[in-house]
Image (cartoon, rainbow, N blue to C red):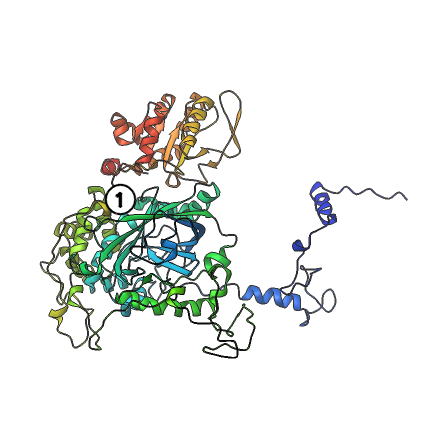
Amino acid sequence: MAKKKVTIPDNEKQQELERDKEHPEDTLLTTNQGLKINDNQNSLKAGERGPSLLEDFILREKITHFDHERIPERIVHARGAGAHGIFQLYASQEKYTKAKFLNDTNTATPVFVRFSTVAGSRGSSDLARDARGFAVKFYTEEGNYDLVGNNIPVFFIQDAMKFPDLIHAVKPEPHHEMPQAASAHDTFWDFISLMPEAAHMIMWVMSDRAIPRSYRMMEGFGVNTFRLINEKGEAHFVKFHWKPVLGAHAVAWDEALKISGKDPDFHRRDLWEAIENKQYPEWELGIQIVAAADEHTLGIDLLDPTKLIPEEQVPVEMIGKLTLNRNPDNFFAETEQVAFHPGHIVPGIDFTNDPLLQGRLFSYTDTQLSRLGSPNFHEIPINRAISAVHNNQRDGHMRQTINTGRTSYQPNTIGGGCPFQAKLSEGGFTSYEERIDAHKIRDRSESFSDHFSQAKLFYNSQSTAEKKHLTDALRFELGKVEITAIKTRMLGILSQIDRLLAENVAAGLGLEVPEQPEKPINQGIPADADPEKYEPTPIHLIIESSAALSMDRKENKGIVSRKVAFLVADGVDGQSLEDARDALLDEGAVVKVIAPHGGFIRNADGEDIPVDHTLLTTASVLFDALYIPGGAASIAALKQDPDAIHFINETFRHCKAIAAHPDAHALINVTYVASHADKNKDSGLYLDDDMEAFIAGIGLHRFWDLEEERKVPA
């Protein structure tokens, strides 16, 4: 009987060919101990249908590892994204610090940076209204230095003793675990309304700063005041700043809500794609230096973390550039396991007596021990110093370094005295010598009691559009609060910042602003203290406003990495599409073709153009600007597509630049844009196909001043 020929499908043939290849050793599957595995698909059983056997060590190893793959997430800053890069110094800072990485302009210091939201869990949205973490690990030749900060330069509280209360208040309420990644609920505002020291931070968090366009387009701050120490032992106070080269930008609150539904990984994806496209994110490192003799001349207490130093008083000096140029190879091993700590410093950088910073120095180590499960978390590759480590430690869970010799103590003679203590001339660290003569006491300096002047300064510094956004945010947040007494008490706090602000918020809540705030206004006081001692001091402003505190500055930083949607359909004019795309790509923008269907669209000459996204799988909120190429058939098709009309209206509503080929006027005329077409370029509309003007408009980010005129149903 003839043997029946069996046809093997092409994909199976390919698999057979792959199996027949000579595999290099490092591609063969093994156990954790390097034993090569023959079968990773079937457990060891007593017979084909029998019970699994306890002796199956391959199964047990695989399942055990899986069972323990999830480490406890960070209590705060759980959701984040990270990247590798370098820091390059512009000029030596030896007059301020002996830190080598801030003195050597020839060395590119490796860094790892992690950005994060604060309140939400790992599964929450990137677009929550929240502060953002901005933590940088410098791998210097003197050891690791961690600059652990936020995208907001101040904090809610003045003393670390209150940090657990703050986080307990902002986290989901314990009786039903809601809401996730949101501060719009009773417990948070109950706490804030009793804590006037939080007033300044609240202004920032309710502003557009809390919903950045991108990690690449937000500022970073060290928050606390640190010291720089030079070779002579001279100390200067310092505030650290990160200034994004692309400028600081935000999205609209309505956009943030929609992005959370369309792409909750928006910021993560944006960072990853920019680096993959070699459009490397960059920030300049700036410092504000205050001489020790000038500590008390600025009208604020430098040790108060709820205060900033206005840049008009102490300019920010740019000293170097941070460039992120490599994505992690493994998110868990790097971004999740990286451990930052403000106590990781190098000679030339030291602490101050900021009571929030002092608490952070304990808290970070303690949480890393819990989260990473071992005192040896510094040996995880992402946390390892590039300098030699001789710490006399040998034991502890998950120890990786294999030390030789008999001694793990110092001083010793058996080990020849090694490791020796480093002399100052050898780079040994010593703390700044500060004279302290005081009583042991639980108290707070009266210089910390001005809670409203900088909140007022921040509000005064916002543009009209930014003030409107801030007011709407407070209306939304307090509108979610169920207890009227909390809302009323918070209106009293707001009235101390700006009476009109409080009245505008109250109007949205249907309440009246109290004539006087509830007394005592500050309830974060010791049980036996005189409340009057802790009442906020009268508002005083050295300067009335600061341009650096507003993001609506009309600075054109170019359009590198800006995402522009091209709205097209079959029959598009290929020439207008290509000309516009080339002009935008030449300026570094990212162009995506959006169409009613996937695959390809055919242009008017019958040529296929690949589609990047369909109107179903994307949305205008994921782009920075919109261009509509010509082509009568394409325009006719888009006029009949409600999603295309919505895409245009929504782009217009969010004050983004829109450009169109003259053929597209027929499409524009069936949208809400038509009623504003006469304003043209001044309102971000470029309907004469002027690509040069369109590119300039994208560089301005948004046309927020026209927002009130753009209330369209989109």
In the picture, the quarter occupied by the C terminus is top left
Q: Amino acid at mark 1?
A: Met
Q: Residue lying farthest bottom?
A: 413
In which quarter of the view is residue 195 placed?
bottom left
- Does residue 72 appear in the picture of this structure? yes
Q: Is residue 429 above or below residue 555?
A: below
Q: Is residue 389 left or right of residue 364?
A: right
Image quarter where the N terminus lies is top right
Residue at point 29%, 67% (across, down): 432
Image vertical order of residue 322 relative to residue 680, above or below = below
Camera-side residue of 13 and 172: 13
In depth, the one of 27 and 467 nearer the eye is: 27
Which residue is at the front of the view, 125 or 633? Answer: 125
Residue 575: x and y in percent read: 45, 22
Residue 233 vertical position relative to residue 81 in the rendered view, above or below = below
Q: At which x and y percent is residue 335?
A: 46, 56
The residue located at (38%, 59%) in the rendering is 146
* Residue assigned mark 1: 551
On the question of residue 263 being in view, the answer is no
> What percent of the width, then of the height, locates residue 314?
21, 51
Q: Is residue 604 left or right of residue 341?
A: right
Q: Give the residue at the far right of this rendering.
A: 1
* Helix, strand or loop for disc 1: loop
Where is residue 292 shown, x and y percent of the image?
21, 61
